[in-house]
Image: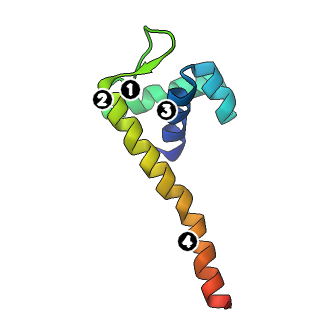
């Protein structure tokens, strides 16, 4: 599981469309789809119900997406923490 894969599933959930999510993530649609498929295989669940348009998360996918958002939020906080510690040393 990678942060990129988590970014991809959050983008698909946000845009409810694989091609639009791929554009948002600056990757090709096949790349995004392949990475999401790898994540689903690793987890052993389907994150999205692809039979419906727009694409919607499965029940298990909703829980995974909620956690993915928390993980991404925490990961984005790391550079802020580093900058804060640098300012402490400089001050």
Query: Which of the two discs, 2 and 4, labels the residue nearer the N terminus?
Result: 2
Asked if 10 appears above or below 73 in the picture, the reply is: above
Determine crowd level at label 2: few under 14, some 14-19, many 20+ residues with C-alpha closer than 10 A.
few
**Are the two marked residues, 2 and 1, in contact with CB atoms closer than 8 angstroms?**
yes
- Local SS, label 1: loop
Q: Quadrant of the C terminus?
A: bottom right
- Which residue is tagged 3? 9
Give the numbered dot on residue 47.
1
- In percent of width and height, residue 18 lies at 57, 21
- Which residue is tagged 2? 60
Q: Residue at x 49, y 49 (%)?
A: 72
Determine crowd level at label 3: few under 14, some 14-19, many 20+ residues with C-alpha closer than 10 A.
many
Whole-number angstrom distance, CA of label 2 to CA of label 3:
13 Å
**Are the two marked residues, 1 and 3, in contact with CB atoms closer than 8 angstroms?**
yes
Whole-number angstrom distance, CA of label 2 to CA of label 1:
7 Å
- Which residue is tagged 4? 81
**Are the two marked residues, 2 and 3, in contact with CB atoms closer than 8 angstroms?**
no
């Amino acid at each position: 599981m990678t942060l990129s894969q988590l970014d991809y599933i959050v983008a698909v959930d946000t845009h409810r469309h694989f091609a639009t999510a791929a554009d948002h993530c600056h990757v090709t649609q096949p790349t995004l789809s392949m990475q999401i498929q790898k994540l689903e295989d690793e987890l052993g669940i389907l994150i999205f119900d692809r039979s419906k348009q727009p694409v919607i998360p499965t029940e298990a996918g909703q829980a995974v997406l909620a956690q993915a958002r928390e993980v991404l939020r925490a990961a984005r906080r790391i550079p802020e923490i580093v900058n804060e510690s640098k300012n402490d040393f400089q001050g």
